[in-house]
Each structure stands twice: as C-alpha cells, then as structure tokens.
Image: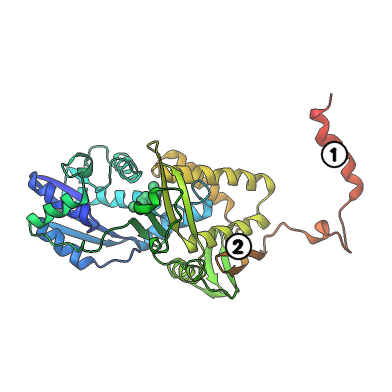
Amino acid sequence: MKKVVLAYSGGLDTACCVKWLSERGFEVVCFMADLGQPHNFSPAKKRAKIAGASRIYIRDLKQEFIRYFILPSLKANAIYEDKYTLATALGRPLIAKYLVDLAHKEKAQYIAHGCTGKGNDQVRIEVSSMILDPKLKIIAPLRIWEFKTREEEIKYLAKHKITIDVTKKKLYSIDENIWGVSIECGVLEDPWIESPDDAYRFTASLVGAKSKPIYLTIGFKAGIPVEINGKAYCAMDLIKKLNVIGGAFGIGRTDLVENRLIGIKSREIYEAPAAHLLIAAHKEIESLVLDRNTAHKKQKAALDYADIVYYGLWYTPQKNKLDNFINATQKKITGIVRLKLFKGGFACVGRKSPYSLYKKELATYGKGDKFDHSKAESFIKNWAKPYLK
Ligand code: ARG
C-alpha cells in the first residue's frame, strides 16, 4: 500500500488532507510538531483518526528548534526585509527533517503538507525534504484538489462526519511558534488598511501597553542569551519571559509588505517581542567586541542569512559556510546589555563586556585623553592618497 507522512496541524486544511489522501488509497501517517504554538493536541488527534489516519506522531521539538534554528539565527541577527524575524521560516526545515525521518521509520514513499501553491512554506518544506532525501515523493493536496473555498472543505468534512470547530469566522491565517507569530489574510490584504487590534495574538496595542518605563538587563555568553536581570535562564524560559515582558509593552509588532520567494508581494504582520529585544541586545555586545571589518562583514552576513532562511535554503553549503563565519565571530560576544522598555518600544541604553574593544582613554574628549592627535594628519593624507590626482 502507498504510505504517506503528512505534516498535520489539526486545522481545516490538513484535516481535509487526511481524508482526501486516504480516499486516494494512501495509508496516512500524521506528524504534529510542537514548536511552542498554543495547542490542544487531543481534538486534532481524534479528528485525524476519524479522517482515517493510521498513526499520529506528536513531537515536542521546542528544544531542538531553539538550539539549532533560533539561536543560530539570533547569532546572525537575521531579519528579513528589516522587519521579519523569521519565526515561521525557521520552523519549516525542522518540520521537513522530521517528515523525512518519519518516512524512513514508517517505510513511507511519500510525504505531504498542507501548504498552498503561492506561499513560501511549500518551497521550504519541499526543498529541505528533497535535499535530505531526493527519493521521497511529495504531495501537496492543496495545489491539486477540487476544493476552491473553505466552505467546500467544511462541507467535505461534514459529509464524512469529521467535526471541526469552524463556527468562529476565520478572519486571519496565523502561524505561531515560540519565536513569533505571523498573521495574514482578511483585511490585512489591503496594505493601506491599518492592522486591527483583533489581528494580534498576544502583544499589547499602543493604547493598552504599559506606560511606565522599566529597565531590563540581558546577559550573553558567547553569543547566546543566558540571563535576565542577573538571573540565569535556559534559552526557552528566557525567550518565553521576554515575550511576556516585551509583549506587555507592545514591543515587537511589525507590519511588512514582503517579497515572497515565488515572486509576489504580500502583506503580513508579525509579533515577536523576544526576537526583537534579543537581536537588538545581541548587536549591542557585538558593537563593543567586534573589530570594524568583522562587524561590517557580519552586517552583510545578516542579510544573506535572512535570505537563506526565507528562501528555504537551510540545508545548503552556503548556509553552513555562513554559520562557520558567524560562529567564529561569537566566541567573545559575552556581556550585559541594559534596555529601557517603554510604551510601544525600547532602546538600548547601556552595554558592557569583558572583551570590549572600547577604550575610554582613546575616545574621551575630557581629561585623560591618550589619543595621539599629531598622528591624524599623516593618517588622513595616506587615506586620501588613492583618490588624489
Ligand atoms: N510570510 C511569512 C513567511 O513566509 C509567514 C508565512 C505563514 N503565515 C501565515 N500567516 N500562515 O515566512
């Protein structure tokens, strides 16, 4: 019998996928990944069974997601098109890896997913799976099936007595994990319309945000965040805590008209307080520790890294090469950053590191200046030389 491992979320689309695939003679094995999204797995599990799944795997991948995907992206300071800290994009190669692993374990010849034909996620999952095992065949039911609307899908499930709570009108398409939330569709499709409050999942609005500023310190060790206000946290607790604290100030909301990799523009809003706080803080330690040349190279690497993640090229030599460079720059990214959080935003107001290259005796315009001003003139002449006739 043909066997397929399906990336299953439990929502309307993937519930239909289970039934649709089993009607076409497939044994369907479902895979659900816990990447830190709010979830209730048991109704989804039940639904998959009723729809005909032979087996459902649920894997808690939060630790792996943080260690091998989020933290490398943080070290890179990766942000796509200045605004998107890549929560969704980072999760896809990990999901693809588990689809492939489970296909091997289950001796399945196929993997399937519930992505649409014009999004980025289909590319990320399929390219990753092709690289990891080119022999596996891929099915994307949403690209080929007969349903044109959500209503048709709901009818199809009802016909087969598969219950799903779609009473609430679905206003947005939401993808969430511990690194952030991505929200699109509905009124957001008009880039002129301000995103309404009900589009956001957990961050406070500008009006509702805390109004009294607070100070917060974040400590880093070798490029990895390890403490908040002097207290040690594992990366997972630290990210969760910053999402709560930052979210209450309305930090980390962005609104982006982005260039999708298949060539269309789309408008999406994001919530990622921890990601924005951490990337900004991480950059501050780098500003003290990295020499100018490395710092500038690393800024360019951040853009390349974001593109690679966004374009679904995680398992590629170019990504490994960037990781090698980035890791080589992180050994001394140790120190503490002081942030001021205020209504709707934050600022880095202080930073220190035992490896700081900042030398007050060279920078000062006050007493104790050790900079040799007399050397500046010959430096400038040499600097200008290549451009002089
Ligand atoms: N535009 C983002 C990306 O390509 C998020 C895609 C998923 N968004 C969603 N609301 N389902 O990574």
In the image, taking residue 364 as reference, residue 315 lies left or right, namely left
How is the protein colored in the picture? rainbow
What amino acid does circle 1 point to?
A: Ile
At a point 15% along the width and 52% down the height, the residue shown is: 18
> Can see residue 91?
no
- For the point 55% across and 44% down, the residue is 301
Task: Specify the quadrant that holds the C terminus.
Answer: top right
Image quadrant assignment for residue 118: top left
Could you say which is closer to the camera, residue 56 or residue 370?
56
Identity, as a three-letter code, of the amino acid under mark 2: Thr
Give above or below for 52 relative to 107.
below
How packed mark 1 is, by other alpha carbons closer than 10 Å (few <14, some 14-19, many 20 or more), is few
Residue tagged 2: 334
Give the distance between the C-alpha atoms of the residues marked 1 and 2, in whole angstroms: 34 Å
Residue tagged 1: 380
Q: In which quadrant is the N terminus drawn? A: top left
Residue 181: image location, x then y, percent: 40, 59
Question: x, y percentage for residue 27?
Answer: 10, 49
**Residue located farthest toward the right when viewing the structure as drawn:** 374
For image coordinates 21% across by 45% down, the residue present is 111
Q: Quadrant of residue 128?
A: top left
Q: Are marks 1 and 2 in contact (CB under 8 Å)?
A: no
Up-down: is 143 above or below 286? above
Viewer-proximal residue, 229 or 332? 229
Circle 2 sits in a helix, a strand or a loop, which is it?
loop
Q: Position of residue 150 (x, y in %)?
A: 21, 51
Nearer-N-terminus badge (1/2): 2
Nearer the observer: mark 1 or 2; the answer is: 1
Indicate left or right for 239 with 361 as reference. left
Q: Residue furthest front?
A: 193
Residue density around tag 2, few if under 14, some if 14–19, many if 20 or more, within 10 Å: many
Disc number placed over residue 42 in the picture, else none: none
